[in-house]
Image (spheres, rainbow, N blue to C red):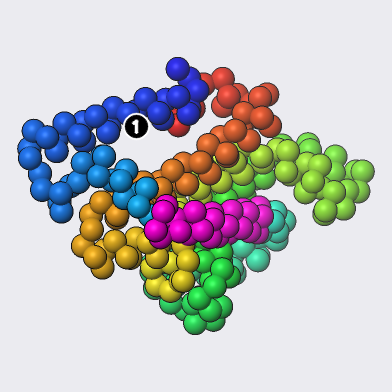
Amino acid sequence: MRHPLLTAILSTGAFIALWWLAVLLLKLPAYLLPAPDAVLDRVVFLARNADLLSHLAVSTSELVLGFALGSLVGALTSSWFAHMPLAERLISPLIVLIQTAPKIALAPLLVLWLGFGLSSKVVLVAVVVFLPVMASTLSGIRAIPKSVWDLCQVIRLSPAARFKQVELPYALPAILAGMRIGATQAITAIVIGELLGAKLGLGVLLAMGQENNDAAIVIAVVAVLSLLGYALYLLVNGCERRFLRWHESQRHLQIG
């Protein structure tokens, strides 16, 4: 039962059973907490009448592109900071200020600057993913033994070769750890961006359910968003198992 997908299916099944039991025993009205079958009906309804797959494709594109951009920029920035402490001291406060600002406050600015299309959502996701990847990667790079750095100087590795051949392999466990954190936060950024301005995306369907006071649609869309985020989390976990078989962390049971 160590496979993460099997564990997720079993735990989700147990949760749905408890949910169904609570609805039946407590006789909760559907406008407060609809039964699981009512939520499933709404998923089918959205697929047939609201073009659910198109909305899902748009949100998936925003998630993948923003996640990849944030992870790449975070890893490269950490390498720059590791070799330029002055740049880190000057720029880190600005990065922290941007990250601590509520994303719901940043989203309208991005919409004004980049429009209602894909770009503003991708950038918002990248901003959310950037910090955990950058911080964890920087810690991984700084943990590289001094003897390795001395060897890089002796053989005169260029910065690009040093990053590819030394820093990336050593820091890969930290990079993937930061990506796992970013994967759990990226979905929130997508929803915020789409709620504030979008023509397509799961956030649009979420707003539709809220405007119609339809709890079943809201829960249905939240469930789809959760599955999307969990799929990304499993993808990062799969990369860890594939590329870090040698690492000590893979000897222990992973979350998920």
- Where residue 88 sits in the image (x, y, percent)? 62, 62
148 w.r.t. 74: above or below: above
- Where residue 12 sits in the image (x, y, percent)? 34, 32
Q: Is residue 108 magenta?
A: no
160 w.r.t. 123: above or below: above
- Please, what is the three-letter code of the amino acid marked with disc 1? Thr
Residue 43 visible at all: yes
* Residue at x-position 24% and y-position 29%: 17
Q: Secondary structure under badge 1?
A: helix
- Where residue 234 sits in the image (x, y, percent)? 53, 37
Residue 92 visible at all: no
- Predominant SS along the magenta part: helix
Q: Quadrant of the N terminus?
A: top left
Q: Mark 1: few, some, or many residues within 10 Å (few <14, many ≥20)? A: few
Q: Is residue 143 left or right of residue 215?
A: right
- Where residue 170 sits in the image (x, y, percent)? 70, 38
In front of the other: 181 or 125: 125
Q: Identify the magenta region.
A: 47-75
| Residue of label 1 | 12
> Furthest residue to the left?
26
* Residue at x-position 79% and y-position 46%: 164
